């Protein structure tokens, strides 16, 4: 028989799961109940029917309350826009997933397997911890990667994801570093489960223009020195990279 302390700890975890899952809009009732059963058996070492039935009833009440709330969402939400953006990315060969896995590593392994089956160009997803952070108003972080011989690699895929998200009106930012995740600004989490989003009226995103060529790390004229010695008896000329004009033969 589990101890009272073990039951109390399990109950605390179940309360958190029910709260998140009913508000998330990602999981259906069967998925949530399956997760509750697993948590109870893992934490208490055996099935606990009374506890499960108690929280199964909470799930039903929570999902019904969320469905009534959804019915009041007349306008397209940020989650509606994100769903549309993910649909477009899937159509462009970038596999997407929402609330995939519990951690970044687990989500990456799952999305890689999904992408391999579809011969994808790239992928984008967020995981369970990202979802919980977004529900609390912390914004949403997207992980992404490129596959195969994708031109430009991760940077190109990142730019394309941001391009599609912005096209659909998702407030997003990314500094261009493939080691950093794409950031969706904090928003009210309103992802639909029981209702349909109103039509978006947004055409497919246009083709993303190519990235500008990178500037050379070292100036080809002055070789990084900033000046050009044209006549050792005079002051050195300033290179074009510093705003000056090199004379002929000064290369």
Image (tube, rainbow, N blue to C red):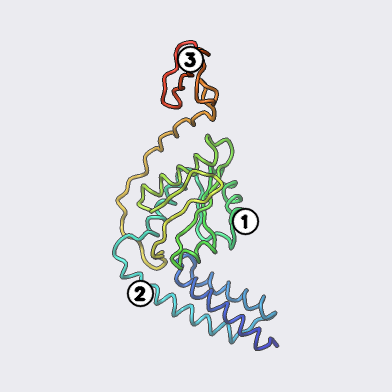
Lower position in the chain sequence, tag 3 or tag 2: 2
Q: Where does label 2 land, which residue?
A: 68
Q: Secondary structure at mark 2?
A: helix
* Near-viewer residue (131 or 97): 131
> Is 201 situated left or right of 100 in this image?
left
Q: Are marks 3 and 2 in contact (CB under 8 Å)?
A: no
State the separation of the CA atoms marked 3 and 1.
61 Å
> Which residue is at 53% across, 75% downward?
16
Q: Where does label 1 land, which residue?
A: 105
Which disc number belongs to residue 234?
A: 3
Neighbours of disc 2 within 10 Å: few (<14), some (14-19), many (20+): few
Neighbours of disc 3 within 10 Å: few (<14), some (14-19), many (20+): few
Q: Secondary structure at mark 3?
A: loop
Q: Secondary structure at mark 1?
A: helix
State the separation of the CA atoms marked 2 and 1.
36 Å
Q: Is residue 28 above or below residue 248?
A: below
Q: Is residue 44 above or below residue 190?
A: below
Q: Are marks 2 and 1 in contact (CB under 8 Å)?
A: no
Whole-percent x, y for residue 41 in the image: 66, 77
Whole-percent x, y for residue 119 in the image: 56, 43
């Amino acid at each position: 028989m589990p101890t009272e302390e073990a039951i109390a700890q399990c109950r605390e975890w179940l309360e958190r799961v029910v709260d998140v899952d009913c508000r998330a809009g990602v999981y259906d009732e069967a998925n949530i109940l399956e997760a509750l059963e697993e948590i109870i058996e893992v934490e208490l070492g055996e099935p606990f029917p009374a506890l499960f039935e108690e929280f199964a009833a909470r799930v039903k009440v929570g999902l019904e309350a969320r469905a009534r709330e959804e019915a009041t969402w007349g306008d397209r939400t940020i989650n509606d826009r994100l769903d549309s953006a993910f649909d477009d990315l899937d159509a462009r060969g970038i596999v997407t997933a929402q609330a995939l896995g519990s951690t970044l590593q687990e989500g990456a392994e799952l999305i890689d397997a999904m992408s391999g089956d579809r011969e994808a160009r790239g992928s984008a997803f967020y995981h369970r911890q990202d979802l919980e952070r977004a529900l609390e108003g912390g914004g949403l972080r997207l992980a992404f990667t490129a596959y195969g011989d994708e031109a430009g690699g991760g940077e190109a895929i990142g730019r394309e994801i941001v391009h599609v998200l912005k096209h659909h009106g998702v407030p997003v930012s990314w500094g261009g570093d493939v080691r950093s995740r794409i950031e969706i600004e904090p928003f009210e989490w309103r992802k639909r489960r029981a209702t349909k989003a109103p039509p978006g009226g947004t055409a497919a995103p246009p083709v993303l223009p190519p990235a500008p060529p990178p500037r050379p790390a070292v100036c080809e004229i002055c070789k990084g020195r900033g000046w050009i010695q044209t006549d050792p008896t005079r002051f050195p000329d300033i290179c074009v990279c510093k705003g000056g004009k090199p004379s002929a033969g000064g290369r």
